[in-house]
Image: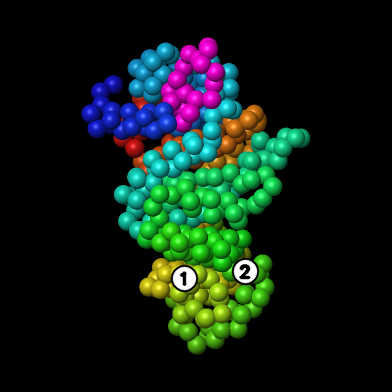
Amino acid sequence: MTSSPMADARCQYLLHLLAQVPDPRKRRGRRHPLAGLLATGIAAVIAGSRSFAAIGQWAGDAGPVALAALGAERGPAEESTYRRAFALVSADVLDRVLGAWLHTRATQAGGRLVIAVDGKAVRGARNREEKAPHLVAALAHGIGAVLGQVAVDAKSNEIPAVRELLKAFTDLAGAVITVDALHTQSDTAQAITGRHAGYVMTVKANMPTLYKQLKKLPWTAIPATSAVSTGHGRRARRTIRAVLVPAWTGFAGAAQVAQVRRTVTRKGKKTVEVVYLITSDRDADPATLAAWVRGHWEIENRLHWVRDVTYQEDKSLVGTGNAPRVMASLRSLAISLLRLDGQANIAAASRHHARDPQRTLKLLQTA
């Protein structure tokens, strides 16, 4: 396969970044470099591999040229090699490396960066001794690339994990962070604005006092913006009204509050949901706020759902050491690279790459 110097440089850059992940294995008997194992694992997951056995099989079929380009000059490794290495490798360092690599591509592709933050448990990794790992990820709206991921401490919850995730970004200036109602916290708002970024936070009934205060505002006197969407046998109308923030909200940098009314009609039955927003963006008009709120759910539809359905993450039996989190990171990276390549259907894209290892190598070389 021929490739351009730029493509080769990009693949080498990925290998250079992966080489920054410390190899935890003992030197004696170490035959395959960790960067090559990780790069091969990434390529195999892009091609749809869901287990260590599948990764080993993909490597065995890839051929020496593709493996050499992935830093696996000594040929394919056995399944057990991937299993041991991925169980020991630092998932924190790996997530930082992969997130930094994707961050440069996402900001180039998307203009102003809007980032959805949300958590997901890797349920298949639950065992009798330990809870399932719970990971909080950051996804670029519209682009579909995962820009960062951290694990929730076993004795904690998602709320402090989100603040840790924000610390992992070298530059958030000008970005907008969208979070669901769980993360509508004054400390989180402070952490976001402290990084010179903005936020859009949702207020629901889980914050009863604030919810009631926002509900009492004179919304009927405020001009509204509406949009209608149809699909999946339903019709949804979203109406949003925004006003300058009252002084009593108490959120750092808060500039506007908004009411979002969602009316869904399915088979003649109508349901109405009303939520409220707090945002630090003074200039965002109601239509923009509505787009950000809708875009936030891409992290469920374009990442978590795909990891569960296409990659069968919640049924995965990978459960040793750091391996469940490492595999989750590789799945997120695979989805991100395919999204950046313009692929809408990840399952179909995986099948496409599974038929020819050179396609996967080309994707890594041109990402």
Q: Nearer the viewer, residue 90 or 145?
A: 90
- Which quadrant, please, contains the N terminus? top left
Disc 2 crowd, CA 10 A, few/some/many (<14, 14-19, 20+)? some
In the rendering, at what x and y percent does residue 146 appear? 46, 46
Above or below, 302 against 90 in this view is below
Look at mark 2 in the image and give the residue it sits on: 204
Quarter of the image for the C terminus: give it. Answer: top left
Query: What residue do we see at 33% from left, 32% from top?
Result: 13
- Would residue 298 be seen by someone viewing this image from the given angle? no
Q: Residue at x 48, y 84 (%)?
A: 222
Where is residue 313? Give x, y as percent: 60, 37
Toward which corner of the image does residue 358 lie, by quadrant? top left
* Colour scheme: rainbow
193 sits left or right of 323 in the view: left
On the picture, is 324 further left or further right than 166?
Answer: right
Q: Is residue 360 left or right of residue 120?
A: left
What is the x, y in percent for residue 337? 40, 39
Give me the residue at 31% from left, 49% from top. Answer: 108
Q: From the top left corner, tell me how far across and down residue 345 is, in percent.
A: 45, 42
Q: Is residue 280 above or below residue 327?
A: below
Q: Amino acid at mark 1?
A: Gly
> Among all residues in the image, which is located at the extreme left?
5
**For the residues marked 1 and 2, what is the alpha-carbon distance in whole angstroms?**
20 Å
Q: Which residue is mark 1?
A: 253
- Residue 24 included in the magenta stretch of the image: yes
The magenta stretch spans residue 87: no
The amino acid type of the residue labelled 2 equals Lys
| Residue span colored magenta | 21-42
Choose between 98 and 171: the one closer to the eye. Answer: 171
Label 1 SS = loop
Q: Secondary structure at mark 2?
A: loop
